[in-house]
Amino acid sequence: MVGIGVIGFGYWGPNLARNFSQTDGFELRWIVDEREGRRETARRQYPNVQLSANVDGLLADPDVDAVVISTPTNSHYSLAMRALEAGKHVLVEKPMTTTGAEGRKLVEEARRRGLVLLVDHTFIYTPAVRRIRQLVQSGEVGELLYYDSTRINLGLFQHDVDVLWDLAVHDLSILSFLVDEAPIAVSAVGKSHVAGAPENIAYLTLVFDGAMIAHINVNWLAPVKIRRTIIGGSRKMIVYDDLEPSEKIKIYDKGVDVAETPDEVLMMRVNYRIGDMWAPNLENAEALRVEAGHFLDCIRNGVAPETSGEVGLRVVKVLEAATLSMRLNGCAINVDTLEPKDATP
Amino acid sequence: MVGIGVIGFGYWGPNLARNFSQTDGFELRWIVDEREGRRETARRQYPNVQLSANVDGLLADPDVDAVVISTPTNSHYSLAMRALEAGKHVLVEKPMTTTGAEGRKLVEEARRRGLVLLVDHTFIYTPAVRRIRQLVQSGEVGELLYYDSTRINLGLFQHDVDVLWDLAVHDLSILSFLVDEAPIAVSAVGKSHVAGAPENIAYLTLVFDGAMIAHINVNWLAPVKIRRTIIGGSRKMIVYDDLEPSEKIKIYDKGVDVAETPDEVLMMRVNYRIGDMWAPNLENAEALRVEAGHFLDCIRNGVAPETSGEVGLRVVKVLEAATLSMRLNGCAINVDTLEPKDATP
Amino acid sequence: MVGIGVIGFGYWGPNLARNFSQTDGFELRWIVDEREGRRETARRQYPNVQLSANVDGLLADPDVDAVVISTPTNSHYSLAMRALEAGKHVLVEKPMTTTGAEGRKLVEEARRRGLVLLVDHTFIYTPAVRRIRQLVQSGEVGELLYYDSTRINLGLFQHDVDVLWDLAVHDLSILSFLVDEAPIAVSAVGKSHVAGAPENIAYLTLVFDGAMIAHINVNWLAPVKIRRTIIGGSRKMIVYDDLEPSEKIKIYDKGVDVAETPDEVLMMRVNYRIGDMWAPNLENAEALRVEAGHFLDCIRNGVAPETSGEVGLRVVKVLEAATLSMRLNGCAINVDTLEPKDATP
Amino acid sequence: MVGIGVIGFGYWGPNLARNFSQTDGFELRWIVDEREGRRETARRQYPNVQLSANVDGLLADPDVDAVVISTPTNSHYSLAMRALEAGKHVLVEKPMTTTGAEGRKLVEEARRRGLVLLVDHTFIYTPAVRRIRQLVQSGEVGELLYYDSTRINLGLFQHDVDVLWDLAVHDLSILSFLVDEAPIAVSAVGKSHVAGAPENIAYLTLVFDGAMIAHINVNWLAPVKIRRTIIGGSRKMIVYDDLEPSEKIKIYDKGVDVAETPDEVLMMRVNYRIGDMWAPNLENAEALRVEAGHFLDCIRNGVAPETSGEVGLRVVKVLEAATLSMRLNGCAINVDTLEPKDATP
């Protein structure tokens, strides 16, 4: 039995606590939240779990093997680092940290200690995204040409992070699940409509070395809710609408074939291919339950984490570059230029 | 009766010819197309109209007061200039020219000669766009916060212009119809998926001086057709879906109100306002017919053109800046920096 | 504090228990279910509530003022009657009984004893249906011309009741909430596709004395889920789509105006009126919570029940007539002809 | 070359004239319409075609092999009969006649003379309906369980026929294309909301001998336009939405499997099967062009008409029974009971 403690029992923490308490193999032992009211709520739901306003008891408890961190983003690094130093496996909410530098330290600490560091990029554990990856990896989609996502709705305005760190983070994790290579340049433009608050609208474009381009449109101030991603491949195209109750994924046998006519090199003929559409049935698994099972598998059986610290770091680095690009009104930023220029690489 | 000649009888020319031939006050006298087959088609539909493979006869004909140019973009400038020099009023298809320099010359020539120069930005004459402008100008929408447009579908790949010049041009004309000020910076990123061809996917963002930001997503390689523009205002928000058979415009009484609590300057409360939605009934007018009537009004009564050469020039200048930004992977370009640095302003 | 007991803790009972336990003014004292497993589930959720496999203790308990019955339909009558005879107020799941005769007895018993008899026609307590009634009663919709409902999906096949008693019952309760008069004739046609099982598809039409006609299409074997009701009025028309996350109600200013030309009596001119569409914002109330509050109001303050036993009886009588019509392949049945032919009316 | 004449140049006639004039093998020789204005319109479009206010010249012309009748329904019988008697092949608009008795006479006359009698049930020639038939006939759909169609919109109110004869006629022709057997009973209920006018709302249900049931909901007074047919089969289900620009047909691998448990004969287990959805690409053929080609094939090559007089008669007989049922508020009518009771069968 893997003993587990949940730090942060606000908006998302209760979902994590519920899923871990219901997953065979885990035993929920601690819930930590500095707010008395939240602890009271936790007490009623989990009468046998230890409660505390701080992490000291949890980190010192030898029956705790792993901690789940669902606190505000700016506390992720220090809490995760303390947990790793206490020898605990860590599952941390997304985004993993607020800077790439912090993220790198967590990744290194976990590696050094041989501990699991998993980032809660929940979408990766949904049946829809897993099916899309299968379609991409099997070659059915062909070469990836573009990823174009719209993730807009009214609210919830965040005070500490901008809309990229809140919403685009999902697309960046999905992208890194589908595409091995990192973007060579990141361009973002955004706007804040509330004085003193972070950007509530942003447009992020990622340029890759090959045929691929990715674009993410996020907005907290939209009158309609849209969660739609179009993935264009050389053989098939996918429309993924996460708000569809069924048929979340539609696969289109559409595209273009280019024929060059030999004598006229400047002339080309684009032929449109328009075929059937197909919506595979998806199983009804709850993503957090799948993720909890995977965390157990990583801890017990040494399985490689699908949303590892490295993945979390890659996402944070793109967000960092995007924020900088946004300050520069869209100037392309090379993700790796933000790395410290170490004398010893 | 205003005598008129149509130059170019390819894809769009027949629509122009039909509308002008059916608008009281115009008399269609010439159709010019260098292709014998197109002239033959024109002959059958308009047996009483003069046909020619070149514009010489048309331009020399004193009974022709105005010409309509619907040829490939790269011939617009020279044909429009010749027509103006021959003393004809000009309606030219969008985009007006391929460069701002050419555009400026047309505008100046028309002004000097007192001739009407109208650009065929057809969307401006649709009931939907006119209603949106009315909602904006009446103050009902409040301060404009953003314009976010998605204009994607499969095909038609163009050989000579990229997807911005083909599709984003519509949004740029609508934008200039809604917003008086010009953008201070333009950022665009795009990709071509056909070797040797212009970009078939592009993302264009326009930054304005005040609260406004505009974003245009255009794509010739999408499996689904989308024509959806969201316009966010401080009081109301509009969703304009041009593919809806009815209810093209939906107005949402949604938004946020920001309340700062006095003691905690760093803390703010965003209150969401969620009210009714309303879809005004739109009349069923054909845009080209409205445009033809407006052209007549400009010629006869000296009415100021709604899609004047100045508007067409403003659109071309943004497209020019966007193309440059696209080459630089999104670097923000100030539209006016592309103006020649004249010694005499 | 009104003491309450819930009989039946299967599919719907837990929702009732939850809402009553969370409504101020009620105290949940008993949960009765003959299945050990269901009692065990109830025990975990409500450790302080008394549990029993039968109703004897509950009905004998002087601290219980009201009972909620959510058992299979064929047990409603006997349980409700025993509860009324024990002096308890009763809330019974829909449909109230399996026959009009039973329903009439319950209504009479409740009236004689001055007890509240409420039927759980939940839709009546939704913000959408309440708004529709307001639009109808205020005269905004004009004279009601038709009610046309489609309520189809895959499953859940019932073994004891047909699809009319399972799904059309919702529309019949909504109808009786909107229209005072009872239908003069009922015609239904249906089909069972599972040998030995009740009809899984049925089409029910209700004819009224005046302009009104109502039609209900119910189906357990449909590949898509639809919950859409169109309500036509002489002044406005409403489309109510219960699956829409927002904008459940759309009000169309559409209709026809008929003009008769004096000389040609056989000729008439139908003019179409096509105006704006409007979707009012609806509050986010949970129907069962509203219903629980209303039950309390009826018990404490003598408010007249909105889904009274009389309403429940009216619904059952239409269902009874519909079942008979279905056996006769659609023959119109007068609802009142099924009443016993008493010598003394 | 098959010489052809079109009788009736009102709403639909111009479409027929255009398609026949553009189909190789036909030569359009006559257009007949008693209205001077319509003849004038025809003259401009077809300067070489003979025009007349009556059919005498057309029927006497030996160069006319076939006539197309697109006049009001009540003139179909006499015009078609005169044309057949003059030895012409006939294509007549739907519905073929106003009574079954008339229809039978046309069928017999055409058979006796060996002439083609085709009814313009246009939907049968659409790619969507043809694909549905292929899915049904190939066995992919399994046994047909139900056909449920909604065909509603605002207008056009007809003065001489009710909404069943105007709209349900389409579904009845599609049904007879999919199902060989005739319904054993027809039940319809309807309502007129305009004094003195025929029913503008009607609900028609057809009962068949086996598992099949069909239902058609037609309405001229609906605020939204719907053209949606659900076809349930034992193996697959089809949703056909004629308003979808693409993906008109969606095929769902959904259904139920029934397992009876041996010891409990009253108990059964319904298992739901939920699989993929699939939307085949459909070719872009214009139905009237296909129909014109088929008419030619029938005339020249003796191919059996797909929408023969017999089909047209079957449709008219159901409509006749439906009208009678509607007068009786839904009483089931056996289609064949309306046949005259001949002494010699």
Image (cartoon, coloured by chain):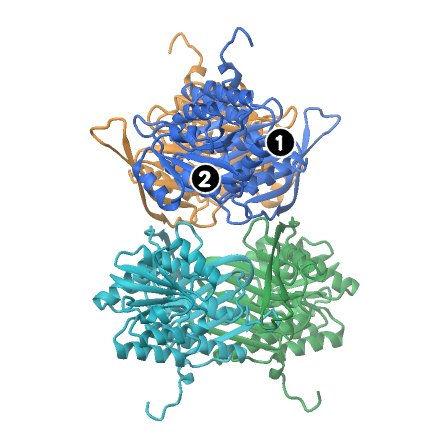
Chain colours: A orange, B blue, C green, D cyan
| Quadrant where the image shows the N terminus of chain C | bottom right
Left or right: B270, with C75 as reference point: right
| Quadrant where the image shows the C terminus of chain C | bottom right
**Residue B259 at least partly seen:** yes
Q: Nearer the viewer, mark 1 or mark 2?
A: 2
Which one is nearer the viewer's eye here, B344 or D260? Answer: B344
Indicate the quadrant where residue D223 lies.
bottom right
- For the residue marked with disc 2, what is the amino acid? Leu
- For the residue marked with disc 1, what is the amino acid? Leu
Mark 1 vs mark 2: same chain?
yes
Left or right: C63, with D187 as reference point: right
Which one is nearer the viewer's eye here, D94 or D266? Answer: D94
Residue D195 image point, x, y percent: 62, 72
Left or right: D278, with B176 as reference point: left
Q: Is residue C252 above or below residue A213?
A: below
Residue at image position (43%, 52%) is: D244
Q: Secondary structure at mark 1?
A: strand
Q: What crowding class fits label 1: few (fewer than 14 Cα within 10 Å), some (14-19), or many (20 or more)?
A: many
Q: Residue under circle 1?
A: B144
Q: What crowding class fits label 2: few (fewer than 14 Cα within 10 Å), some (14-19), or many (20 or more)?
A: many
Q: Residue under circle 2?
A: B28
Q: Secondary structure at mark 2?
A: strand
**Residue D11 at least partly seen:** no
Indicate the quadrant where residue A55 lies.
top right
Residue at image position (45%, 71%) is: D73
